[in-house]
Amino acid sequence: MALSKRKRATYFRYAQYGLLLLIALVIAFTANWSEIVHTFFDLPTAGQMLPELVTVSLKNTIVYTIFGFALGLLLGLLLALMKLSSVAPYRWIATGYIEFFRGVPALLVFLAFTVAVPLAFKIKFDIYSTVMLALGLVGAAYMAETIRAGIQAVPKGQVEAARSLGMSQGRAMITIVIPQAFRIILPPLTNELILLTKDSSLVYIIGLARDEYELTKFGREFLSRSPTLTPILVVGLSYLIITLPLGYLSRYLERRTGGKKVSVV
């Protein structure tokens, strides 16, 4: 007797549950839990890390990310407007910038501001300027496309309504279009903030004083003198402390802003 489509789907779902349970049991019974606990959950090592981790490394990671995101957001907005401009050279410059920085690894941008740019222009950047420029320039290329898409997603009727009220094109863009665009793109911008948080780990290639360490640099330094791999777990959890709330915020904003439009009249 042939099974109905619904019953086949139910049995297939149960089979998947059984497979997942089997995999979990195999992992549970084959893993060397005593060695895992000793290697990754060494509480004395974690306790030694915590004071400096919280007061220096975690704080620096957040500061570096905020600086990079602020520059990236401002530059990304400018690039988005340039790409939408009726002036062809502006569009060419914006397109060239976006394609270049989206195609070049962020690590090379950090190296450029650490070695190449100071050598070429006789300029010495401090750690905050280096991180802000490297993260900001890379982040701007991605944020520009997100902002451009948000601006184009605002209904043209909103601009027409603003113009009918006597607003200039520039004023309509600043007071009507851009605020609505940012309302639409808040979730993807939050995701970009998460990516910049993780990219801030690339600062480890720069020679840093101890009070300038971010999470990855601090973890590598502590790991070199630790008898276990606990520093890796502690640093990973520290990144999650930053990124998980941002992920929840992104999904919350997506639910709040999805499908809603703001009228100008």
Image (tube, rainbow, N blue to C red):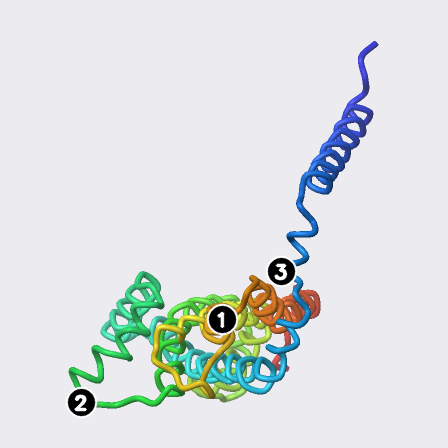
Residue found 60% across the figure and 72% down from its top? 238
Label 3 to label 1, Cα distance in Å?
A: 15 Å
Label 2 to label 1, Cα distance in Å?
A: 37 Å
Residue found 42% across the figure and 72% down from its top? 139
Find numbered disc 1 in the image and state the secondary structure of the residue it sits on: loop
Mark number displayed over residue 137? none
The three-letter amino acid code for the residue at tag 1 is: Arg
Q: Nearer the viewer, mark 3 or mark 1?
A: 1
Residue at the farthest left position: 120
Label 3 to label 2, Cα distance in Å?
A: 45 Å
Most foreground residue, 139 or 148: 139
Please indicate whether residue 77 sits to the left or right of residue 124 in the image: right
Find numbered disc 3 in the image and state the secondary structure of the residue it sits on: helix
Q: Is residue 133 visible?
A: yes
Q: Nearer the viewer, mark 3 or mark 2?
A: 3
Q: Earlier in the sequence, mark 3 or mark 2?
A: 3
Contact, mark 2 vs mark 1 (Cβ under 8 Å): no
Q: Earlier in the sequence, mark 3 or mark 1?
A: 3
Q: Quadrant of the C terminus?
A: bottom right
Contact, mark 3 vs mark 1 (Cβ under 8 Å): no
Contact, mark 3 vs mark 2 (Cβ under 8 Å): no
Whole-percent x, y for residue 24 in the image: 72, 40
Q: Is residue 154 visible?
A: no
The three-letter amino acid code for the residue at tag 3 is: Phe
The three-letter amino acid code for the residue at tag 2 is: Lys
- Residue receiving disc 2: 122
Mark number displayed over residue 40? 3
Residue at the farthest front position: 227
Q: Quadrant of the N terminus?
A: top right
> Hey, which quadrant is residue 86 in on the image?
bottom left
Whole-percent x, y for residue 10 in the image: 80, 29
- Residue receiving disc 1: 225
